[in-house]
């Protein structure tokens, strides 16, 4: 099973009260856009999340890519994360696929075990330490560049940059991944600018 950098488990966090929503996506950027578009227009099907968004405002919600999974593992993995994290905004406690994926017998068996709280099959992926390490990627400093590579400014994190530039964190991460050569199908620019992880920018001979 091929694991891409675009599909996996994500989390939406209310930074005021730390309540969360956990979901799965075949494409993080598209899923993030859909969530916040529905929330912005007060049309989100999750009334718990919508009510909280209306109360606290967009700037107090963060979309974070937690970990990558292959598409046919998404619902199974989502169920595990729901069981472990017990996200307050998830109205439905059983993960449901809208992708039309036909599950194999092995996948069904693992999903059945996940409902019983058995998470051993995930191994390292399931450890909270590993998940926390993945989520800290959001705090990695990034730089904003013109198309010719001229430095404009630095940001302490993707989250901060997204708030200042009024764009989705996933779009900035996508640009950084493209610059790092991690995925050539990701975005090259966002709002006409390039973005790069600060450490990579330094490794390229920049100060």
Image: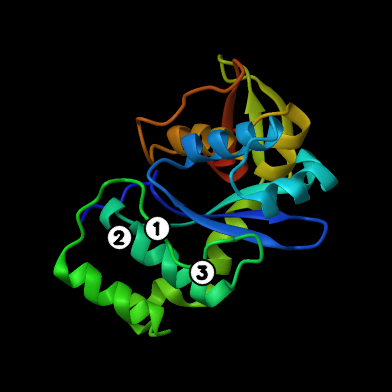
User: Where does label 2 land, which residue?
Assistant: 73
Q: Using the rendered view, name the quadrant where residue 17 is placed.
A: bottom right
x 62%, y 34%: residue: 38
Residue 193 in percent (x, y) is at 60, 20
Q: Nearer the viewer, residue 149 or 125?
A: 125
Disc ID at residue 158: none
The mark found on residue 82 in the picture is 3
Secondary structure found at label 1: loop
Residue 168 showing in the rendered view: no
Q: Quadrant of the N terminus?
A: bottom left
Q: Nearer the viewer, residue 29 or 195?
A: 29
Mark number, residue 96: 1
Whole-angstrom CA distance, mark 2 to mark 3, is 14 Å
Q: Secondary structure at mark 2?
A: helix
**Residue depicted at 49% across the width and 69% down the height:** 81
Q: Are marks 1 and 3 in contact (CB under 8 Å)?
A: no
């Amino acid at each position: 099973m091929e694991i891409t950098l675009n599909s996996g488990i994500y989390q939406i966090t209310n930074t005021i009260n730390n309540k969360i929503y956990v979901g799965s996506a075949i494409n993080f950027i598209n899923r993030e856009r859909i969530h916040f578009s529905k929330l912005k227009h007060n049309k989100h099907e999750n009334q718990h999340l919508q009510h909280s968004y209306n109360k606290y405002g967009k700037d107090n919600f963060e979309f974070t890519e937690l970990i990558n999974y292959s598409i046919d593992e998404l619902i199974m993995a989502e169920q595990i994360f729901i069981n472990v994290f017990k996200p307050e905004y998830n109205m439905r406690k059983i993960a449901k696929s809208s992708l039309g994926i036909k599950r194999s017998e092995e996948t069904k068996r693992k999903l059945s075990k996940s409902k019983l709280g058995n998470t051993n099959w995930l191994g390292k992926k399931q450890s909270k330490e590993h998940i926390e390490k993945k989520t800290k990627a959001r705090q990695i400093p990034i730089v904003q560049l013109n198309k010719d590579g001229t430095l404009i400014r630095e940001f302490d994190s993707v989250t901060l940059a997204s708030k200042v530039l009024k764009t989705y964190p996933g779009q900035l991460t996508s640009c950084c991944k493209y610059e790092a050569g991690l995925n050539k199908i990701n975005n090259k620019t966002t709002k006409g600018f390039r973005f790069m992880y600060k450490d990579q920018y330094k490794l390229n001979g920049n100060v």
